[in-house]
Amino acid sequence: MSGEQRHRVPVDVHLILIRDTDKGPEVLLSRRAGDVYAAGMWHLVSGHIDGPHEDMLTALIREAHEEAGIIVDPAHVHYALTVHHRGPGGRSRVGAFFEVSVWEGVPSVREPAVCDAMGWFPLNALPDPMVAYCRAGLDTYLAGETVAIHFQEPGDPIAYNPALDRRRPLTHALGPAGHHGPENAVREFAEQAVGRIRTWTDASWPRETSRVWRVDGEEGGVWFVKVHQNDRFHHREVEALRSWVTSLGAAAPRLVAADPALRSVVITALTGRPLHGMALDPATEAQVQQGLGRLAAALHRAAPEQPAGPSPALGKVERHLKAAGPYLAVGDEDLVLALARVYADLPAPSAVPTHGDLQYRNVLIGEDGGPRLLDFERSEYASATRDMVRLSDTWTGRDDLRAAFLKGYGRLLDPDEELRLDCEAAFDAVSGIAYGMAHGDPEVTERGRLTLLRLHTARRV
């Protein structure tokens, strides 16, 4: 190409703004209006890079504010995919698409001269008419792919027409799927279990290394596919779903398929809204706690009791204290060590099937107001009180919630169990502080600090 003018194309950015609802994820779209290309058609919030001074991230954040009036933190912007597009008129461009699910403000029309409507639409029911270029990007996103070519032919409509779909994904030719879909072997495993899958939607928690996708079947049906971070978690969840969890009926997912070599499972989908972050009135929250008590009791009775294993060694507690030491308050270390000594002297409890991570973020609230339990990868035989450790943080200053849980559970705790719960809560708090500070997880860190403060206030030793 030396001596010839090089081919140059514009670069534009597209915002895939996602919100979760009880019916599935929705995406924000705006309708183009006025004297603009594709007037009357739906499109993502998008725009061009202004010039060589502006990078893609800056352009995306600027367009989000100018077009929709929202503020996006760069830390919450995730690259999704790239589309090389050529319109019916023959001009080509490269579009970079970015996913955002955390922002400030309420999206609204901020440029009425070029946009006359803005709204949320289910990802599995996109509106018509939609710009074909935009639809190519969203179809690539929904398929869990990261690169596509969308070269339209002269005479093709600007609006998306399924009979003239020019999208050609390149992800599978280039290697494993990217951020929004699993590797090909996991895709094949899932489709062997439930049939052809139309869309993959990443549903992973930001701070976990296990990956979870919601999958929608070509002929209907919704499932979740999970790839565990290690063999131990895979084995625990599979064994729990095959045995103990069945006692919870419709309040827990059902195992559809498992592949230990891929550390993957397919499970049925539960309907409901996440309890984590939900604002409930006191009476409703007490009702939820009572339901959680019933579920915990059913799980704890799902298999015969076993002798408990050895109590945590003092050396393990001391290691956690050392890691958390710089972030502990005065007196925390003495409190935890005192509780460790008490714990060693308590009678050994019976071990029962437990959830292992029973807290609000692993609970959905169904349409009937009842709780549903998720995520059994930490499930194991342990003391019954171990399942109350993280829930007990919600009982601080709320004796009504504690009473409601125990009413659902069917009995009160005896004095030894009350002490054991305090000890296990202290150990979990110190471990959480050490983990949270090392991994930049302020929620886990703060939960641990509040737990230790609560134990200081109600000190029993």
Image (cartoon, helix red, strand yellow):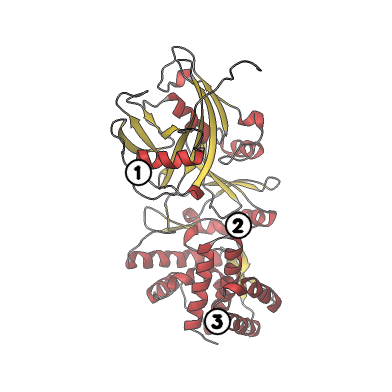
The residue located at (69%, 77%) in the rendering is 313
The residue at which mark 2 appears reads as 377
The residue located at (64%, 16%) in the rendering is 3
Classed neighbour count for the residue bearing mark 3: other residues with Cα under 10 Å, few (<14), some (14–19), many (≥20): few
Amino acid beneath label 3: Val
The residue at which mark 3 appears reads as 330
The residue at which mark 1 appears reads as 69
Q: Looking at the picture, tell me which residue is in the foreground, 132 or 349.
A: 132
> Closer to the camera: disc 3 or disc 2?
3
Classed neighbour count for the residue bearing mark 1: other residues with Cα under 10 Å, few (<14), some (14–19), many (≥20): some
Q: Do callouts 1 and 2 mark residues in contact (Cβ within 8 Å)?
A: no
Amino acid beneath label 2: Glu
Disc 1 to disc 2, how far (Cα)? 40 Å
Which mark, by number, is residue 171?
none
- Mark earlier in primary sequence (3, 2): 3
Residue 432 position within the rendered picture, expressed as x and y whole percent measured from the top left = 58, 67
Q: Looking at the picture, tell me which residue is in the foreground, 73 or 240.
A: 73
Against 394, residue 269 (above or below) is above
The residue located at (29%, 26%) in the rendering is 34
Q: Looking at the picture, tell me which residue is in the foreground, 124 or 7.
A: 7
- Mark earlier in primary sequence (1, 2): 1
